[in-house]
Amino acid sequence: MQLNQYVRSVLNMNFDWKFHDGDIEDRNFNAVHQRFKNPQWVKAGNNGIAMVRYPDAHWETVQVPHDFVITRGQFSPDTPSSSGSLVRGIGWYRKEFELPQEDQGKQISLEFDGVFRDASVWVNGFYLGNQLSGYSSFSFDITDVVNVGGPNAVAVRVNADEHEGWWYEGGGIYRDVRLVKTNPLYVPQWGTFVKSEVSEQHGQTEAFITIETTVSNANITPVTFELCSLIYDPNGQLVREVTATQTIEADTTMTVNQITAFDHPLLWSIESPHLYELRTVLKIQGQVSDTYETTFGIRTLSWDANEGFFLNGQSVKLKGVCCHEDHAGVGVAVPRAVNEYRIRRLKAMGCNAYRTSHNPPTPDILDLCDRLGMVVMDEVRLPGTSPEFKQQLTSLMQRDRNHPSVVLWSLGNEEMRIQGTATGVKLFKRMQQWAHELDPTRRCTYAMNGDWQKVTDFHEEHGFHLDVHGFNYMIKRNYEAYDIFHKKYPDHPITGSENTGTMSTRGLYAEEISEIPLVIAERWQTSTIWTNPVREGIASAYGEAYPLWGGTPQETWQVAAERPFVAGLFVWTGFDYRGETSPYDWPSVVSRYGMMDLCGFAKDFFYYFQAKWTTDDVLHLLPHWDWQGREGEIIDVWAYSNAERIELFLNGESLGVQDVPLHGHNEWKVPYAPGKVTARGYKHGQWMMEQTVETTTAPTAIRLSSSRVTLDADREDVCVVEVAITDAAGRVSPLANHLVQFSVSGPGTIIGTGNGNPLSHENDKIPKRKAYHGLCQVLVQSTGEAGEIILTATSEGLQAAHLSMQTTDVGEIPHVPSLHAKTEEEQRTKYDADNGI
């Protein structure tokens, strides 16, 4: 079938926005009744900030995703440390653009993947609507208020002063924006749902596909149309084509159901994430009216109360993490390439499951989990049945239900106020019912804390049965809680939905040496367990501190690993994030819960999970071996490994052989002497692995490295660069804290820096950063030209480093160019000309 590629246009709307930091009281530019400063509710189309030629030349030009809170970088002790102590606020965004005359008769929509938060949107002075939650994706039909063949303006007011969670949430248009143009007969946003079933008969696998397609008709007359659904396999080959003819009334929406089947489907799995594509084609009298593409996967899901989770009939233990969307250098405005870096880091740790804590994620994360092979627990921000919360649940599920990676819908997290009440039962029961109607192919969960059995008893007594029980932590380390629950409710599937909660700091093994003193928060004085009195008060990399309700990774994983009826767990958290600075208060600004820091640099616990969650040979020693001035003092040496036995050597002398505990780690008390500590790991009596940590010499150089140095020249691709301070032998200096300056030449720009230091108050947007325990990070983004980018890093007293990156031409990116004038004089001239002055 020959398709007209221009029947639907999806245009990138991310580039060249104007941004004003702060609120604007006077909004009467070109408005009716000039005597009013704020006239947008006086007459229709009366918001001056959303008028073409509004004088914004002095505003900052920005690219979204954009987090104005992290860009501002203003820390304050008056802002709660739970949200990162970064001052929030209000901001305005504007973009002027032109619609060509050929768009006459088109349907025009503006799509936002997420704006934090309380976003009000206007086009050409006309109010379109408001989106309260900063996590919900939303769109507006702007057909009736745009000027076809002329200039247009969109304005977005963002109020990030209020928070939705208790962590850093940023502020601004922090996810992608698109302009979508279609004919009047079209598939609306999220208008397809592909459901699959798999059958095995006589050794042959067959896939049964049900396609639900929503069709909208904006014409003023009924239309008879042909719906053609084409399914392409992961190799791009057409495997099925099914058609239907329908008549749709004027100005209405309808759903068309189609069913087809084919043999030998390639199943989506964690190891082989095969993806199919549905291409939906609408035709009127043989002419294509719209095309719409949907990526989906074919797989089966099941949850068993005795044996856990099954994917394609195979038992899969969930080795999961909980994550907030927050990264060094960019805050919550995380580019797709940085999210890919983060997912790949989790995969390297052995992770196979991702919980979107505690809110709908950016669509990029689900796309990446689909492509890279990671199952997802997809979560709403808050439970509720009011129109607002029903819409939040509906938009989440309609947006995400075609992603094969999504295996559970989560209805909320730790709602202590309602989870064990009659009101809570009514809310969860109604939400689960709605979820089953929106998507009968998946089950629901809820991340419950507290006394699970008591709350579940109440639910059961009041007629509510949760599909899959999600349990947070272990009720003050009561390791038998799962067994007790399973014995009473043997037919209830269980997974650990939030677990561990250990607090640790990358590279820190003794008291923090810092100009900024640590302050333990009052509430954490009695709710933190310090398991080693020698390091009490230090959230060290040994991971010996955790909250009263938490536990160590070893203890937590043992509970899940040894109980087949527990589907798995989700560790709190994959990465550190701003806010929740437990157990410390200001001036701490970053959490310490991650298996990696805010940059994605591995903490030591990363290797514990790598040893347990992968089949790779893993042997990791800690700490570093730079303890000058402490010669003869005892240093705690630990090892994480999946070897059977480990032998430790100090400067070539054996310190003995230990068996590796099944779920724990190995420890030695080693008197410090400069040199080398070496561990050898044995399997089946054979020497299989080795690691050495050495005393380093004085730092002499900077080293730059990245897992990828070829970027698309699309203005959005990003290279994540590790910056290491090394000695003359190329070894990372574990105590180095040099200030590193960055610059680029060629078609690239620096968009942020970080170092993972929970105490750092440095501005992420300034191209310089102190190393923290020898490491920091810089993010380099491509511009629109192909060529070579050279990143240069310098620091006083160190040899400079250079990294070459190549940007490749990807052709013209379909996008909406900006019409913003460069100066206010130019704006006034154009405004006068437009108005005949």
Image: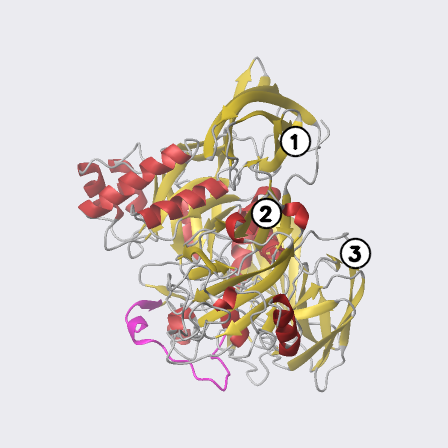
As helix, strand or loop, the secondary structure at mark 2 comes to strand
Q: Single out the mark in the foreground, 3 or 1.
A: 1
Q: Amino acid at mark 3?
A: Thr
Q: Is 40 or 18 nearer to us in this picture?
A: 40
Q: Is 244 or 133 nearer to us in this picture?
A: 244
Q: Amino acid at mark 2?
A: Val
Q: Give the label on residue 288, or none.
A: 1
Q: Residues within 10 Å of mark 2 (few under 14, many from 20)?
A: many
Queried whether the magenta region covers residue 749, the answer comes back as no
Q: Give the label on residue 180, or none.
A: 2
Above or below: residue 144 compared with residue 39: above
Q: Residues within 10 Å of mark 3 (few under 14, many from 20)?
A: some
**Of callouts 2 and 3, which one flags the residue occurring earlier in the amino acid sequence?**
2
Residue situated furthest right in the rendering: 787
Q: Is 7 or 752 nearer to us in this picture?
A: 7
Is residue 777 something that shows in the picture?
A: no
Q: Position of residue 664 (x, y in %)?
A: 46, 55
Residue that mark 3 sits on:
808
Queried whether the magenta region covers residue 522, the answer comes back as yes
Question: How many numbered badges does the structure rendering display?
Answer: 3
Question: Which stretch appears magenta?
Answer: 508-529
- For the residues marked 3 and 1, what is the alpha-carbon distance in whole angstroms? 34 Å
Look at the image and tell me in which quarter the N terminus lies: top right
Q: Single out the mark in the foreground, 2 or 3.
A: 2
As helix, strand or loop, the secondary structure at mark 3 comes to strand
The reply to whether callout 3 and callout 1 are in contact (CB within 8 Å) is no
**Magenta stretch secondary structure, dominant:** loop
The reply to whether callout 1 and callout 2 are in contact (CB within 8 Å) is no
